Image (cartoon, grey):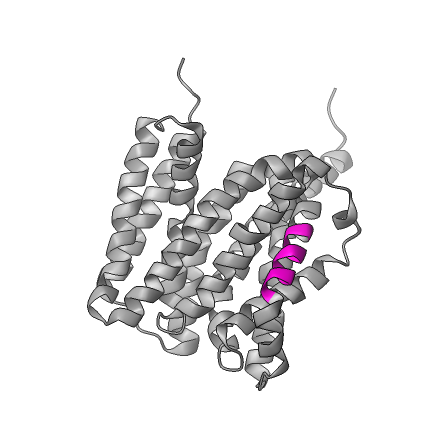
Amino acid sequence: MKMPASSASEASKHHSVSTLLDWTLLVLPGLIWGASFLFIAEGLESLPPNGVTFTRLLIGFLTLSVFPGVRKPVARSDWGGVALLGVIWMALPLSMFPFAEQSVSSALTGMLNGATPLLVAAVASLLARRLPGRGVLIGLAVGFAGTILVAAPTLGSGSSQATGVLLILIALVCYGFSVNLARPLQQRNGALPVIWRALGFATLLTAPLGAPALHNAHWTPASLFSMVALGAFGTAIAYVLLAVAAGRIGATRASATTFLIPAVALILGVVVRGERVALLSLCGGAVSFGGAILIRRASLLPAKH
């Protein structure tokens, strides 16, 4: 039986809207997180690093608080895991980036973040206590070689830049562990309740040093806008969008949004702040991106028995 023309048209229109929504949910988090390194750099014009971290966490927590779904209960047995997530996913790594960006450009910081999928895959294999498959191993080798190339030009630029790169790498290692910890917590309790509580814990944890810094801030319009955008979008809305995307198109496909971060950070750093990036770092970013693509393709292949 043939579908009426009007019904076929409606179905086609619904499919187009659904596809557009999926792409929007996939692209927006990457754009937001790519811009976050520019926002951090602008925020540092008015706040010290501890103030930037506390302010973004506070605004992010308050923003997420308007979503009713965040108040769903979390299993008592998972409270410790949520608190740990607040430390290693939020308080610690989000403190590393502002300190790092005092000596490292926002563009380079964002490019180094391209190594996040590599560390997530490496930590997952470590926690599983087994070597990943051949395809993932090749991707890890290529990706980490690219990360070394990205960071290499900073090694001859003084100890402050090298320290900044080290802080970024510490933050990325935290991300590698936290993503693997967050997955089972979110599966059992839902993404929003876990993220909201972790944000609340991280906000309290950073308040002793961050609140006085916020009180003594000297704002400019650009830094104020940047901190509001960093907190509301980069520390709250992007997490919500990614959670919705994972529910609609699957966690593996949704994680592809992280591939946008280095490119967005690079473009904004160069265009908005006039930052310069060494050619070797650009080549390394491309190699690291290639490694992440190899890991993703290997992870999507069916397991061989």
By secondary structure, the bulk of the magenta-drawn segment is best described as helix
Percent across and percent down for residue 276 are 30, 73
- Residue drawn 30% across and 27% down? 134
The residues colored magenta run 197-206
Residue furthest to the top in view is: 305
Percent across and percent down for residue 48 are 50, 77
- The answer to whether residue 1 of the structure is visible from this angle is yes
- Residue drawn 64% across and 58% down? 236
State the residue in front, 52 or 302: 52
Res 52 quadrant in image: bottom right
Q: Is residue 201 magenta?
A: yes
Q: How many marks can you see?
A: 0
Q: Relative to 62, is 72 above or below?
A: above
Please identify the quadrant where the N terminus is shown: top right
Please identify the quadrant where the C terminus is shown: top left
Is residue 74 toward the left or the right of residue 47 in the image? right
